[in-house]
Image (tube, grey):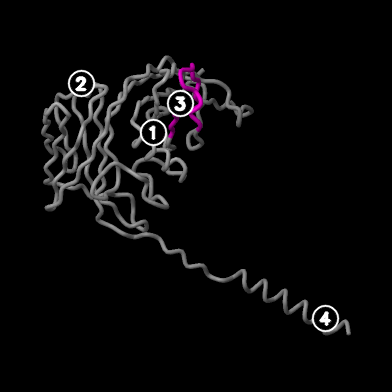
Amino acid sequence: MKTPLIYFMLFSFILVITSCDKVIDIRLDNETDRLVIEGNITDVLGPQVIKLNTNVAVSNTNTYPPVTGATVTVSDQAGNVYKFTEAPAGTYTTPKMIGVAGNTYTVNIVTNGKTYKASSVMPKLVALRSVSSSNSSYNSSDGTRKITVHYLDSKGVANQYNFLMWVNDVRVKRVLVNNDDFTDGNSVSFDLMENDIGINPGDKVTVEMQCVDKEIYTYWFTLMQQNYTGPGGGVTPSDPPNNISPSALGYFSAHTTQTKTITVK
């Protein structure tokens, strides 16, 4: 009686093993030629830049064809209209414009007979007090450092922040965002956690702090949740929500900006 039972168990085991070798067909989204907008209006006087590209299939290299010959303007609620000119290909700029906190800015893009619009409200500036470095709690044994930003959140105002960081002039790919859901009106020390570049004593670190509106925060937060590796860094599992109509990829952001550079100790 034991022999049939042994054969049955052996046969069941073989079925399990062979089932593990089943090929899973992962269908990647290879939709191409969608408009990608990277638009930024800041509170710093100077050229404001809007970049237009088209996306490529996930199987291709990260070379995004520029969208040329578009008509690009930005207006505010007071009726001021700023015309953007193209140079180089796919990059549209206006030479002397400064964003003002509280203003709503709307971009109007006409390309291939289609019009795209997006609006963004520039929040009030929350001052970046300082940037510091300290031993990393994850890799303290190897001497690597973590970077922390320090600021005083405005009380009674919903604030959202986007941070960009460069180590020795190399951009950190990780998306770094924060809000004041649990820190309203408090003095905040926020660690910029990333793992793609080791930060060591003597390194030069530059941090840009952007105060962004709710829609732009949601865009970046969604990318962070999907382990997005930064602008131009790859194809995400799904398109993050943005403020562009009709549907396109990317974002249009009116935000304040501040930058500080430190030498890591």
Q: Earlier in the sequence, mark 3 or mark 2?
A: 2
Image quarter for residue 243?
top left
Q: Earlier in the sequence, mark 1 or mark 4?
A: 4
As drawn, the label of residue 45 is: 2
Tell me the quadrant of the picture where the N terminus can be found: bottom right
Q: Residue furthest top?
A: 129
Would you name the residue on which mark 1 appears? 171
Q: What segment carries the magenta color? A: 176-193
- Kind of element beneath mark 4: helix
Of marks 1 and 2, the one in the foreground: 2
Q: Earlier in the sequence, mark 4 or mark 3?
A: 4
174 or 157, nearer to the observer: 157
Would you name the residue on which mark 3 appears? 180
Asked if the residue at tag 4 contacts the one at tag 1, i.e. Cβ–Cβ closer than 8 Å, the answer is: no
Of marks 4 and 3, the one in the foreground: 3
Q: Is residue 56 left or right of residue 159?
A: left
Residue at the (46%, 22%) spot, across then down: 184
Spatial CA span between label 1 and label 3: 25 Å
Of marks 1 and 4, the one in the foreground: 4
